[in-house]
Image (spheres, helix red, strand yellow):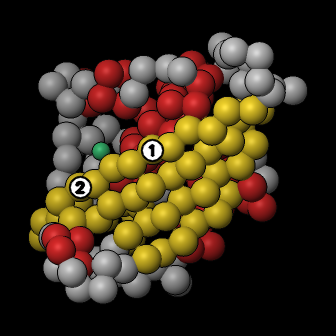
């Protein structure tokens, strides 16, 4: 493909459970419920990894890091993102910008947004201006709205210098 830009879309959702740590965009958030998963269940980083790999034409997060592999049990998803960045570095593509929609009925995300943006920018090694994150609720509807799950969408623009 000869285009100079590619976009990628990622999505993920994890169930909530009491007593689990809540880690969003590699930031530990104090909250009575965390997310259930084989890894640390960081729904933001999983959506981000799928957006990056989708844009770059790489295998998706489940293929790169199978949840049947004991090596990934409770793993810090920032490690998975770093491995994804290493794969991306083998391609001609660099990251332009990232936009995230994080859907959680609780906790309220507004107070955490600056920290999440800063951490994402640091992990991706891009300016914080190139990372945006919106917190949404599902208006008390469905599983997310009932605080049974947290979901995330992410789009990434890659460019070829
Ligand atoms: Mg996941």
Report whether residue 64 is seen. yes
For label 2, the residue is 14
Q: Is mark 2 within 8 Å of ligand 1?
A: yes
Q: Quadrant of residue 4?
A: top right
Outermost residue toward the right in this view: 161
Secondary structure, mark 2, is: strand
Locate residue 16: give its quadrant: bottom left
- Asked if disc 2 and disc 1 are in contact, CB closer than 8 Å, the reply is no
Relative image position of residue 52 (x, y in whole percent)? 55, 35
Picture residue at 48% right of the left edge, 75% below the top: 135
- Locate ligand 1 by image quadrant: top left
Task: For mark 1, give the secondary structure.
Answer: strand
Q: Nearer the viewer, residue 68 or 153?
A: 153
Query: Marks 2 and 1, how far apart in space?
Result: 14 Å
**Mark 1 lies on residue:** 10
Q: Is residue 136 above or below residue 8?
A: below
Name the residue at 69% across, 15% down: 1
Closer to us: 66 or 3: 3
Residue 67 horizontal side relative to residue 99, left or right: left
Q: Nearer the viewer, mark 2 or mark 1?
A: 1
Badge 1: few (under 14), some or many (20 or more) residues near its Cα, within 10 Å?
A: many
Q: Quadrant of residue 149?
A: bottom left
Q: Which mark is residue 75?
A: none
């Amino acid at each position: 493909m000869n285009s100079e830009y590619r976009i990628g879309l990622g999505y993920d959702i994890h169930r909530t459970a009491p007593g689990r740590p809540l880690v969003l965009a590699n930031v530990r958030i104090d909250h009575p419920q965390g997310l259930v998963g084989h890894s640390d269940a960081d729904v933001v980083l999983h959506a981000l990894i799928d957006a990056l790999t989708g844009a770059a034409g790489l295998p998706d997060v489940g293929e790169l890091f199978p949840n049947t592999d004991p090596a990934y049990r409770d793993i810090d998803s920032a490690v998975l993102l770093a491995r994804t960045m290493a794969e991306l570095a083998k391609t001609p593509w660099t990251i332009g910008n990232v936009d995230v929609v994080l859907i959680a009925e609780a906790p309220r995300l507004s107070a955490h947004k600056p920290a999440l943006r800063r951490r994402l920018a640091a992990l991706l090694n891009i300016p914080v201006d190139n990372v945006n994150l919106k917190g949404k609720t599902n208006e008390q509807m469905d599983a997310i709205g009932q605080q049974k799950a947290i979901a995330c969408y992410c789009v990434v623009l890659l460019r070829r210098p």
